[in-house]
Amino acid sequence: MKNLLLAQSGGPTVAINATVAGAAQYALQNPEIDKVYGGLNGIKGILEGRLVEIGERLKNPDEMHLLKTTPASALGSCRLRLKDVETDEESYEKIISVLREYNIGYFVYTGGNDSMDTVLKLSQYLEKKGIDDIKVMGAPKTIDNDLPETDHTPGFGSAAKYIAATFSELKRDCNVYDIPAVTVVEVMGRNAGWLTAASALARKTGCGGPSLIYLPEAVFDIDAFVEDVKEKLSENPTVLVAVSEGIKNKDGEYAAESYQSGAVDAFGHKYLSGTAKFLTDVIRDKIGCKVRAVELNLMQRCAAHIASQVDIDESVMLGYEAAKKAFEGKSGEMTIIKRLSNEPYKTEISSVDIALVANGEKCVPREWINERGNDVTDECVDYIMPLINGETKPVYKNGLPVHFEI
Amino acid sequence: MKNLLLAQSGGPTVAINATVAGAAQYALQNPEIDKVYGGLNGIKGILEGRLVEIGERLKNPDEMHLLKTTPASALGSCRLRLKDVETDEESYEKIISVLREYNIGYFVYTGGNDSMDTVLKLSQYLEKKGIDDIKVMGAPKTIDNDLPETDHTPGFGSAAKYIAATFSELKRDCNVYDIPAVTVVEVMGRNAGWLTAASALARKTGCGGPSLIYLPEAVFDIDAFVEDVKEKLSENPTVLVAVSEGIKNKDGEYAAESYQSGAVDAFGHKYLSGTAKFLTDVIRDKIGCKVRAVELNLMQRCAAHIASQVDIDESVMLGYEAAKKAFEGKSGEMTIIKRLSNEPYKTEISSVDIALVANGEKCVPREWINERGNDVTDECVDYIMPLINGETKPVYKNGLPVHFEI
């Protein structure tokens, strides 16, 4: 009987532990899998032999529930990319020796593009070496929703729910005064605007939501932006703007960088403010009204207290299926979500060759952004809407959420 | 039979609508009070005669519940302070004529220091003019918790809960990597550090919480700060710092301003970053490790989806008692919370002469901050702890919170 190894890498999300929980759940149900190990700090920790047994504890349903509702990577993460086997075979040999030491037959690695690159390289190495009693599967994870092949990624739905709920609350907050004011809210996304697009869902709550939405997928023009804001101000004194951190001008340069090249901070270093701060500086300069810059920052990827139940459930299933497929002999694949229908929302879990995913990127289609490039279409909203459904039941003690800790 | 008028002013909170709901609840139960009106945009809107009937709708318990769980001021707000009656008697006359027009006998004004100044001036004017069939009561509100006389203020408990939960989630997020990194989180509070102190509660969740906490009530020294951070980094690679926006150096200048006097932004204007951004610049310069600045910004005052049930319940009672006392003939007072015991947590609602409250300020006692000025004491934590207890039941539709709208 072989053991299962689980590890996480890349930026944390609210749903990444649910995927580990799902994979562990499969192993605990399968009498032909012995122990469940967690590799600490992703492939980096595995290289260092840092594995801990986690299956026993997860037999307790309360602990399993806690793991599913705990934000960030409970097993720790890393940003390490494996080098090509030609230049660093030693690392691959080291990984295999650690897996052998712990009698690992199945390894599920949860992460984004970089992590899938690790799954690809490792599975290719195993195949090349003719090692067929270790199976490596990938399970997707990224709030950015930018992985190809899967309809969407776990972690995105919860981040989208946080963003939509927060824009709704922010709009209520901004609406209380009747003097002209522009609030620019910066959302994560260097290349893909999915998270920023989710701000549009706030409109469903009746508060009006964001007045303008700018994604990296449409060219950002500063003069058009000032005109857009002026027009919205003429309709309503409260203007709320959603903007991706990664909006770019027609030359493909980040908007904030291209205009601030000469600025220095108090220490004489090159100064670069965030995108929202930059845009409020522009509005103050060109329009002169009250402005405020808000960054959703790390909160958008760790606000487990407002996770999407759909997202958590899907994340569990993606982990479960990855472990199941590894046990059934699959290797070098990543589990994916297929959307079968939108109303009612129905999906199925499948898997694809990891080579189709690794290092790929899926952005918001240009046709899901309006022509002017300052809003998203109904089709885009309809795509995101079902992913934020349902509220999880985080455990609270003395008024604070309780989390799972290794 | 007279009518009740309710209005809100100052910065919005998560609990300010609960106070309006409580006052309306009293009026709806009292057969000797006829209609309930809301004055839009506080005293500014009342001066303009913008009153709307809200009592009929609030007879529906679902609408009442919705109002209690809706963030920001549902009736709108203003920043208007009444001038002294000697220089602007016209405004006072205008207010009285509007109150007469709507047959208002009881007026409950919910807000912070400035709003209580309005209650003081208006009640003094009524007394001076011998008008005794209009009673004006204040009900407290401010996330800053800086009003004197009351044990704490409504809105604070919910903001404290958001801050403590968010610090707990942020710490989980920061903990995933094992490389040295400092995250500085800026919390609201120009003079009073109550909200920043609430970050300490995150430690109760077992994540470790903030490593260092700086409030405006203790002198901030930049060299001591760098030493503090270095020491914490030597113990743990993940350092999370909580800092009030209003920390000041020994000369009483805002720390961020005093060091950035020469900096200019991309437009050549005087540039002043936020306090957290400034501190991360300092760490990058003096220590050189990875840094991140986070501002909790507007989210800390509008995150109704994680409100404190204790806070909402108390806010309802403060509004209820304010309306009740006005009906019973009291005027020129503000309702307050008295803490009777901490374990079990017990309070009673009372009221005090508004003159004791208006324009006053209550800061964190210096003895609730450690000698080094980089943390709060257990006594401070014990004071805040009961205020964040209990989770409200916001209404969700399609995955998003539903709010009350006038």
Image: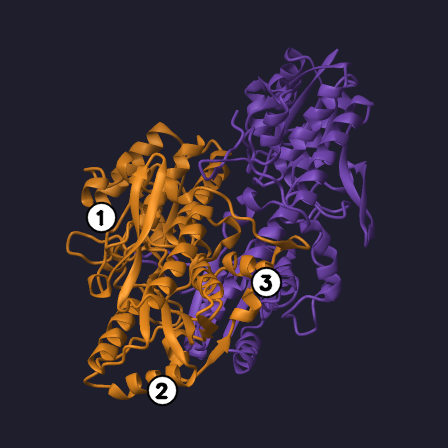
Chain colours: A orange, B purple
Q: Residue at x 25, y 63 (%)?
A: A261
| Image location (x, y in percent) of residue A71 | 49, 60
* Residue A292 seen in render: no
Which mark is on residue B128?
none
Instruction: Give the residue displayed 53% in from the left and 83% down from the top.
Output: B234
Q: Is residue B74 visible?
A: yes
Q: CA distance from mark 3 to mark 2?
A: 31 Å
| Label 1: which secondary element | loop
Q: Residues within 10 Å of mark 1 (few under 14, many from 20)?
A: many
Q: Earlier in the sequence, mark 3 or mark 2?
A: 3
Q: Dot 1 corresponds to which residue? A: A220
Judge left or right: residue B66 versus residue B280: right
**Residue that mark 2 sits on:** A97
> If the image is split into quadrants, where does the N terminus of chain B sit?
top right
Earlier along the polypeptide chain: callout 1 or callout 2? 2
Task: Calculate the distance from the C-alpha at mark 1 to the C-alpha at mark 2.
Answer: 50 Å
Chain letter of the residue carrying label 3: A
Residues at circles 1 and 2 in contact by the CB criterion of under 8 Å: no
